[in-house]
Amino acid sequence: MNKRIQKNELTFDDQTGLCVGMEEIFHRLFDYICRFQKLDCPCLESLTLADDKLVREINSQYRGIDRTTDVISFAFEEGGDVVDAPVRDLGELIISVPQAQRQADEFKHPLIRELCFLIIHGTLHNLGYDHTRSEEDARVMYALQNDILNSFDVDWEDARWKPSEDPLKDER
């Protein structure tokens, strides 16, 4: 029997064990993205936090690029064809926590902010946005992801959103 959801639902798998306690903010963010986009039915999405090795393997297998990346998205809706169903399953996101930490260090902001940015970026891909299609599509997508991130009400410095240990401890 299929479980019917009444609200937006994010399934979460932290394979790194570094982001214990962050699940709450990711659920709030996914719900916020859906409301911001005015999606008219409940949506599902799957989020996996992984290490560089797994993300590199997936990137190599599915994109033919043998290196890690920050986020990989797998959209379940093809070419803008939205199925008329009571629930939309947007797809899957896989984020490399170490790569997110490198980017957070580069931009001098907390890891949680970078993870949220990557969730927004990947979810927009799953909704059909694609910054690689054209300069105009890139402008639209980048503006939208920044609008969502900047209007999401959260204290990025809250201790609840700190990783349990440094994701790059072996590199430092």
Image (spheres, rainbow, N blue to C red):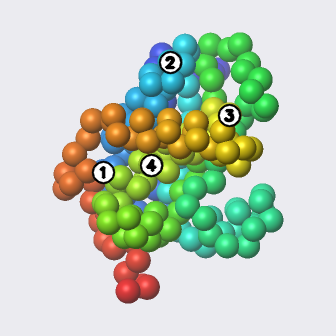
Q: Where does the N terminus fall, quadrant-wise? A: top right
| Amino acid type of the residue tagged 1 in the rendering | Gly
Q: Earlier in the sequence, mark 2 or mark 3?
A: 2
Amino acid type assigned to the residue bearing label 3 in the image: Gly
Q: Quadrant of residue 151?
A: top left
Classify residue 136 as left or right of residue 14.
Answer: right
> For the residue marked with disc 4, what is the amino acid?
Phe
Distance from Cα at disc 3 to Cα at disc 1: 30 Å
Crowding at mark 2 (Cα within 10 Å: few <14, some 14-19, many 20+): few
Residue 63: in sight, yes or no? yes
Residue 38's mark? 2
Image position of 3 with respect to 21: above or below: above
The CA span between labels 2 and 3 is: 14 Å
Residue denoted by label 4:
117
Q: Percent from the top left, x then y, of residue 17?
A: 41, 63
Please tell me in which quadrant of the rendered image residue 171 appears.
Answer: bottom left
In front of the other: 2 or 68:
68
Label 1 sits on a secondary structure element that is loop
Q: Return the residue nearer the eye: 134 or 102.
A: 134
Residue at numbered disc 1: 21
Q: Are marks 3 and 1 in contact (CB under 8 Å)?
A: no
Tag 1–tag 4 contact (CB < 8 Å): no
Q: Cα distance, mark 2 to mark 4?
A: 19 Å
Ranked by sequence position, the earlier of labels 3 and 1 is: 1
The nearer-to-camera label among 3 and 1 is: 3
Image x and y of residue 27, in percent: 40, 36
Kind of residue indicated by mark 2:
Lys
